[in-house]
């Protein structure tokens, strides 16, 4: 312990004998760690935003369908009105909210164009917070109750159909009896969303849809969110037990692409951290070698005075541990600062259409995950120390006289 | 007491050192036989390349011989690994180098304390001993200065204080006056002489400086890696 305090004090002072070099190393490690942590937080925010956007796009954390609906999402595969155990489970405190929907393929016709769409009948009150539609209407009015008249179109679809607020369009689909359902609606609002959604989805009130499609009180799907997303697998098991004849799936099954993008983002973060670390490791080893080369005579002298090779190894390793530690602290400080600056949201308005196309929102909220911060910091610190072990070991292996002669030339 | 009746501190037998291989190899030491006894105040002299520093390095366990052996205080250096050699140097041998070789980030006082700290001497004794040694070499009051704030002569005195602090059985000095002017050299030799007489410490000094050689009581002259003469001063 006494020797450790001696070595620590020596290592600490050695660190500051060349303040410019130490400062540069601190900045290099700090910027590397900052970029790792900040980029990680940003990508996680992007990932969370795209996941939220995907879930809000009429998916929810989970869905219930009639068997066969996912393969053929037509009116023939419909659910009976909710009752019994299933209704009781959906009203469980674990469920944040749920909403029934009618969702079938249809064609929309204006005076000028006909276009294939997905007709979605919603209960506007139940949809609040569950899907994007209650906040997406950018022109005109929203649907305000389950039997409200009128239709909501995406802005791009309205443009394509040469229609707008107050004009009438005709929806056509197959009804529950196998016949053709056709009905005129007045456009009451236009919504903004990702381009493919604006072009392909139209919304009417659920009762209007049921009436038009001759479905009585039947529905196409139930979408739900839980308070704690981690409980989802367990809750789905409970639902399947309560309604074994129905298709009950989580968002991961319903949106495999979203899951894949999430995994890709996480993988990208790991690759980024790896690349940054390799760059930093080169810097650390290079600086350590420079420092050792300059001090080889002094280190040989320490051996001549009676410092055991392992103590010299420990002292130099302590030096690199200290410099990497402070570099990591600097990087973490910069990252906390960056995240605090953007904790109210990083507005991507300047590339809004691009971000929407990629499925993320306009505003990202980078978050500080303490365990991740500390984990990354400790990992960089340990790898930084490890990177310096080999050159230090090689130096210590050289016999004192050789080292003295080398520095003397 | 006659010098030859004192116990030997160092015994070198048939010590040879060759650097390199084949035609380009250099024989730095050739069959050197030497005994250094307790209390000797000995100089190793000779022209550059005569093998003085190489011999000193072998006695200090800093280099391994090609053949022959070195025995220091009854221990065969060839039998010791690097760690054991380091321990031997720490406990029994003081080093004074040509270029002072102080630790630049430590003050003079801390440089002297350094060896004692490695030996595990407690803080109170360490401080007292370091203070005494700096006073002994005439640097009382300069203990808080770092090496860069001291003159060459002062730095060499700190190096001597450091070498003496642990009361080693022997001090090995390699060209200790090489970077000093004649006044500083004379002061240094007076100091070494006094320490040898008052403390009975053994000194082995490699030098080609006549001022240094004149002051020593045993003079070993080397040439071409061999001992040419080994004389006691009158």
Image (tube, helix red, strand yellow):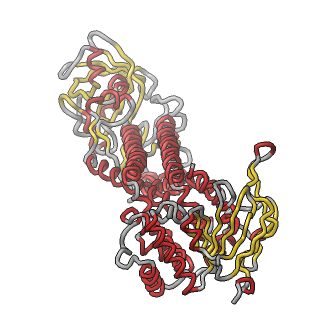
The residue positioned farthest toward the front in the image shown: B234
Q: In the rendered image, is residue B218 in sight?
A: yes
Residue B214, image x, y percentages: 58, 70
Q: Nearer the viewer, residue A350 or A108?
A: A350
Q: Is A398 left or right of B126, judged from the image as shown?
A: right
Lateral position of residue A298 relative to residue A335, left or right: right
Q: Is residue A163 above or below residue B214?
A: above
The front one of A98 and A370 is: A370
Asked which quadrant contains residue A107, the reply is top left
Query: Residue A33, relative to residue B126: is it above or below?
Result: above
Label count reads 0
Q: Residue at x 24, y 27 (%)?
A: A190
Residue A355: percent from the left, percent from the top?
34, 31
| Near-viewer residue (B150 or B224) | B224
Q: Position of residue A144 (x, y in %)?
A: 22, 38
Residue at the (39%, 59%) spot, across then down: A16
User: Which sits in the foreground, A92 or A406?
Assistant: A406
Farthest residue to the top: give it: A112
Any part of residue A314 in sight = no
Q: Residue at x 66, y 66 (%)?
A: B56
The residue drawn where x is 45% and y is 78% is B137
Q: Residue furthest bottom?
A: B1
Determine whether, in the image, residue B165 is placed left or right of residue A36: right
Quadrant of residue A183 within the rendered picture: top left
Residue A66 locus on image (x, y percent): 50, 39
């Amino acid at each position: 312990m006494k020797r450790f305090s001696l070595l620590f004090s020596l290592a600490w002072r050695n660190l500051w004998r060349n303040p410019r070099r130490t400062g540069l190393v601190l900045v290099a490690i700090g910027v590397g760690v900052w970029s790792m942590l900040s980029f990680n937080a940003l990508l996680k925010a992007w990932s969370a935003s795209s996941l939220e956007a995907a879930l809000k796009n009429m998916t929810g954390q989970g869905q219930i369908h009639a068997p066969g609906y996912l393969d053929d999402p037509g009116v023939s595969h419909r659910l009976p009105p909710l009752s019994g155990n299933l209704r009781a489970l959906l009203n469980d405190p674990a469920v944040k909210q749920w909403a029934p929907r009618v969702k079938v393929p249809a064609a929309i016709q204006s005076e000028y164009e006909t276009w294939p769409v997905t007709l979605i009948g919603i209960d506007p009150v139940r949809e609040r917070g569950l899907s994007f539609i209650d906040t997406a209407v950018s022109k005109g009015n929203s649907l305000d109750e389950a039997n409200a008249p009128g239709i909501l179109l995406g802005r791009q679809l309205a443009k394509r159909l040469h229609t707008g607020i107050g004009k009438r369009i005709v929806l056509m689909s197959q009804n529950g009896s196998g016949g053709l359902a056709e009905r005129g609606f007045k456009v009451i609002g236009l919504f903004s969303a990702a381009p493919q959604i604006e072009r392909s989805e139209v919304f009417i009130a659920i009762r209007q849809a049921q009436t038009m499609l001759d479905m009585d009180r039947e529905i196409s799907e139930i979408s739900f969110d839980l308070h704690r997303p981690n409980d989802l697998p367990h809750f789905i098991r409970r639902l399947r037990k309560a309604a074994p004849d129905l298709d009950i799936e989580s968002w991961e099954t319903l949106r495999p692409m979203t899951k894949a993008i999430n995994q890709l983002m996480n993988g990208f973060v790991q690759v980024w951290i790896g690349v940054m670390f390799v760059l930093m490791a080169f810097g650390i080893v290079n600086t350590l070698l420079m420092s050792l080369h300059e001090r080889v005579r002094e280190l040989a002298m320490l051996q001549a005075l009676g410092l055991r090779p392992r103590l010299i190894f420990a002292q130099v390793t302590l030096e690199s541990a200290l410099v990497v530690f402070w570099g990591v602290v600097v990087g973490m400080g910069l990252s906390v600062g960056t995240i605090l600056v953007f904790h109210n949201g990083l507005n991507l308005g300047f590339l809004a259409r691009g971000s929407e196309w990629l499925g993320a929102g306009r505003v990202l909220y980078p978050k500080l995950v303490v365990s991740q911060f500390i984990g990354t910091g400790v990992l960089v610190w340990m790898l930084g120390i490890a990177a310096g072990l080999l050159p230090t070991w090689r130096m210590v292996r050289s016999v004192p006289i050789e080292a003295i002669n080398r520095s003397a030339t | 007491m006659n010098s030859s009746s004192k116990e030997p501190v160092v015994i070198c037998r048939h010590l040879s050192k060759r650097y390199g291989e084949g035609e380009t190899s250099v024989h730095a030491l050739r069959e050197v036989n030497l005994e250094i006894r307790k209390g000797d105040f000995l100089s190793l002299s000779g022209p550059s390349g005569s093998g003085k520093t190489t011999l000193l390095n072998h006695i200090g366990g800093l280099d391994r011989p090609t053949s022959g052996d070195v025995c220091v205080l009854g221990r065969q250096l060839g039998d010791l690994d690097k760690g054991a050699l380091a321990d031997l140097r720490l406990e029994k041998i003081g080093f004074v180098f040509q270029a002072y070789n102080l630790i630049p980030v430590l003050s003079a006082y801390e440089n002297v304390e350094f060896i004692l700290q490695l030996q595990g001497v407690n803080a109170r004794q360490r401080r007292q001993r370091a203070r005494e040694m700096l006073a002994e070499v005439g640097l009382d009051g300069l203990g808080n200065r770092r090496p860069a704030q001291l003159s060459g002569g002062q730095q060499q005195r700190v190096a001597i204080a450091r070498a003496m602090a642990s009361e080693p059985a022997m001090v090995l000095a390699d060209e200790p006056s090489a970077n000093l002017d004649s006044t500083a050299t004379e002061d240094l030799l007076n100091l070494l002489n006094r320490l040898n007489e008052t403390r009975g410490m053994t000194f082995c000094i490699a030098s080609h400086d006549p001022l240094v050689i004149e002051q020593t009581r045993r003079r070993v002259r080397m040439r071409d890696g061999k001992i040419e003469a080994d004389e006691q001063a009158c």
